[in-house]
Amino acid sequence: MSESTLRAAILIVAAVNLAIGLFAAIAPGSFFEEVGTYGAENGHYVGDVAAFYIAAGAGLVVSVVRPAWRVPMLAVVAFWWALHALNHLGDIDQASSDGKGLSDTILIAAGAAAIGYLGWIASRDQVARDSE
C-alpha cells in the first residue's frame, strides 16, 4: 500500500471515530436512540464513549503526520474496537432487537479487523523504513 493510500485510510478511520464521538457528545439522547440502544439510557456513559472516540480519532489524525505514532495508535484503536465487539457480543440480547445486536457486533468486529490490518501494514512499513 502506498504512503498516500495508507494516510488516506487512516484519515477515514479517524473521521469515523471523530464522527461517532462528536455525535455522542453533541446529541447524547439521539445517539442513544439511534446507535446505542442497549439497556437503559445513561448520558454519563454516552459521554465517556464520546470522549474515547474523539481521543482515538484525534490520535489517528496526528499519526498521519507522525508516522511513529501509526502502529501504536492503530493497535490501541483496533484493540478498543475488538473489545467493543466482544462487549456487544455479550449484550446482543440487550439491543433493541437480536438482529441489531448481531449486526452491530459483526460491523464493529469487521472494523476492528480492518483497523488491525492497517496497523499491520503500518508496522511492515515501519520495519522497512527502519532497515533503510
Image (tube, rainbow, N blue to C red):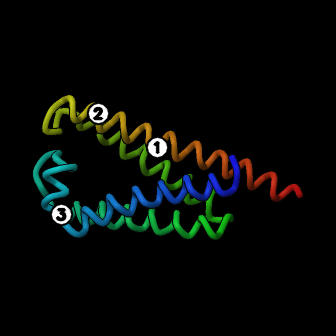
Q: Amino acid at mark 1?
A: Ala
- Is residue 93 or residue 10 the one in the foreground? 10
CA–CA distance in space, label 1 to label 3: 24 Å
Q: Amino acid at mark 3?
A: Pro
- For the residue labelled by badge 3, is the local secondary structure a helix, a strand or a loop? helix
Residue 40: x percent and y percent? Answer: 10, 51
Residue 32: x percent and y percent? Answer: 16, 54
- Is residue 75 or residue 4 the one in the foreground? 4
Badge 2 is on which residue?
103
* Mark with earlier residue (1, 2): 2
Asked if the residue at tag 3 contacts the one at tag 1, i.e. Cβ–Cβ closer than 8 Å, the answer is no
Badge 1 is on which residue?
112
- Is residue 47 or residue 15 the one in the foreground? 15
Residue 122: x percent and y percent? Answer: 67, 52
Is 107 rendered above or below residue 14? above
Label 2 Cα crowd, 10 Å radius (few <14 / some 14-19 / many 20+): some
Badge 3 is on which residue?
28
